Image: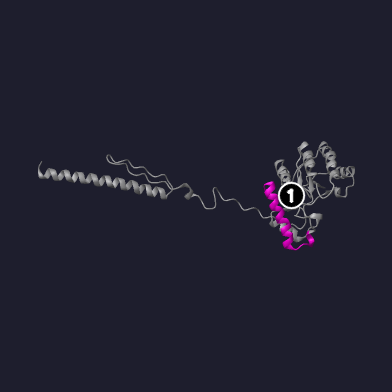
C-alpha cells in the first residue's frame, strides 16, 4: 500500500468518527429541546456500530402540574345579595309547597318525621340548631341520603337582635361547620329563631353563603294545640308557593308527628307537589 493510499484511508475513518459523534450529539440536543417544550423527544437512528445512544429522560409528570391542583380552576362562588327581609314563599310553576321543621334534630321525633316523608317520597327542609345537631349527626347524614335540605337555625336558638355581631356570627358559623361535617356540605339557607331578623343577621347570612327563609303558614305546633288543629292550619293555608313552619324538637312534638301523617297524604291527593326550594340569586 502506497503512502497516499494509507493517508486517504485514515482521513476516511476520521470523517466517519466525526459524523457518528455529530449524530449522537444532535439526538441528545433534540431530546433536550423536546423535553423543555413538553413534547415527546425525537428518536434519532442508532449508529451502525457501538452502544445505542442514551434516550433522553422524560420530565416527571407531577412537575408539569400547576401548584393549585389539577384541572381548571373553580369559579368563585357567587356573592349573595344582602336582603332587607326574608323570603316568605317560593316561586315556581304549579301547586308546589315547602314543608319545614325547626329546632332539631331530636332522636325522639325526627326519625318518625323522616319515616313519613320517606313513605310518600317527599323532600322537606330541616332548620337545625348546632347544639342539637352535634349530638345527632347520624340524623343529618340520613337527611342528606334521603334528599332533604338542611338549613342553619343558629347554635343555641337565641334572640339574634339582642346579640353582638361577633356572638351572632359565632352562633351561625359554628352551626355551618357542624352541618358541613355531618350533612356533607355547608347550608345554603338560614332562618332566624323566633323570626327576629335585623340587618346584621342578613349581612352575616349572605357572607356565609345563606339565603334567609321565613314561612307563610305557621302551624303554632309548639303550643301543642292538638293534632287536628295543626292539620287544619296546614290544609287551610295550603296554596302554591306556601312555606309551612313546624317543629321536630324543642318540646313534645308528638302532635307534629301525628299531624304530618294526616295532612301530607291529603295535600298530595289534592294535587300539591311537596318540594324543596332552589337557591335564588336575585
**Colouring method of the image:** one colour
Residue 74 lies, in percent from the top left, at 59, 50
Residue 95 in view here: no
- Secondary structure under badge 1? helix
Q: Residue at x 79, y 62 (%)?
A: 162
Residue range corresponding to the magenta coloring:
160-189
Q: Quick one: 115 or 80, which is closer to the camera?
A: 115
Residue 51 lies, in percent from the top left, at 30, 41
Residue 193 in view here: yes
Q: Quick one: 220 or 216, which is closer to the camera?
A: 220
Badge 1: residue crowd in 10 Å (few <14, some 14–19, many ≥20): many
Q: Classify 161 as above or below 21.
A: below
State the quadrant of the N terminus.
top left
Majority secondary structure in the magenta region:
helix
Residue 137 lies, in percent from the top left, at 72, 47
Q: Residue at x 82, y 39 (%)?
A: 264
Q: Quick one: 87 or 192, which is closer to the camera?
A: 192
Occupied quadrant, residue 256: top right
Left or right of residue 163, residue 46 in this image? left
Q: Which residue is mark 1?
A: 133
Q: Residue at x 9, y 43 (%)?
A: 2
Q: Residue at x 20, y 44 (%)?
A: 13
Q: How many marks?
A: 1
| Residue lying farthest to the bottom in this orientation | 164
Left or right of residue 18, residue 87 in this image? right
Asked if residue 172 is among those painted magenta in the image, a careful observer would answer yes
Amino acid at each position: 500500500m502506497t503512502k497516499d493510499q494509507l493517508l486517504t484511508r485514515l482521513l476516511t475513518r476520521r470523517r466517519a468518527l466525526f459524523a457518528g459523534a455529530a449524530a449522537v450529539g444532535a439526538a441528545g440536543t433534540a431530546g433536550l429541546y423536546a423535553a423543555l417544550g413538553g413534547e415527546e423527544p425525537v428518536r434519532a437512528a442508532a449508529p451502525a456500530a457501538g452502544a445505542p445512544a442514551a434516550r433522553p429522560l422524560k420530565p416527571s409528570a407531577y412537575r408539569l402540574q400547576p401548584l393549585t391542583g389539577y384541572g381548571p380552576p373553580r369559579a368563585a362562588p357567587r356573592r349573595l345579595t344582602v336582603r332587607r327581609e326574608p323570603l316568605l314563599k317560593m316561586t315556581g310553576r304549579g301547586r308546589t309547597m315547602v314543608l319545614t321543621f325547626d329546632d332539631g334534630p331530636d332522636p325522639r321525633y325526627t326519625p318518625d318525621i323522616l319515616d313519613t316523608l320517606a313513605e310518600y317520597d317527599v323532600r322537606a327542609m330541616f332548620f337545625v340548631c348546632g347544639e342539637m345537631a352535634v349530638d345527632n349527626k347520624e340524623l343529618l347524614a340520613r337527611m342528606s341520603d334521603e334528599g332533604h335540605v338542611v338549613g342553619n337555625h343558629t347554635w343555641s336558638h337565641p334572640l339574634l337582635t339582642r346579640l353582638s355581631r361577633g356572638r351572632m356570627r359565632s352562633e351561625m358559623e359554628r352551626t355551618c361547620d357542624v352541618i358541613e361535617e355531618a350533612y356533607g356540605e355547608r347550608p345554603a339557607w338560614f332562618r332566624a329563631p323566633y323570626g327576629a331578623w335585623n340587618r346584621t343577621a342578613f349581612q352575616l347570612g349572605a357572607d356565609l353563603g345563606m339565603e334567609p327563609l321565613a314561612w307563610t303558614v305557621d302551624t303554632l305546633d309548639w303550643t301543642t294545640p292538638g293534632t287536628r288543629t295543626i292539620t287544619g292550619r296546614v290544609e287551610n293555608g295550603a296554596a302554591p308557593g306556601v312555606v309551612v313552619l313546624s317543629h321536630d324538637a324543642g318540646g313534645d312534638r308528638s302532635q307534629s308527628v301525628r299531624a304530618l301523617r294526616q295532612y301530607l297524604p291529603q295535600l298530595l291527593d289534592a294535587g300539591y307537589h311537596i318540594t324543596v326550594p332552589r337557591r335564588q340569586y336575585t
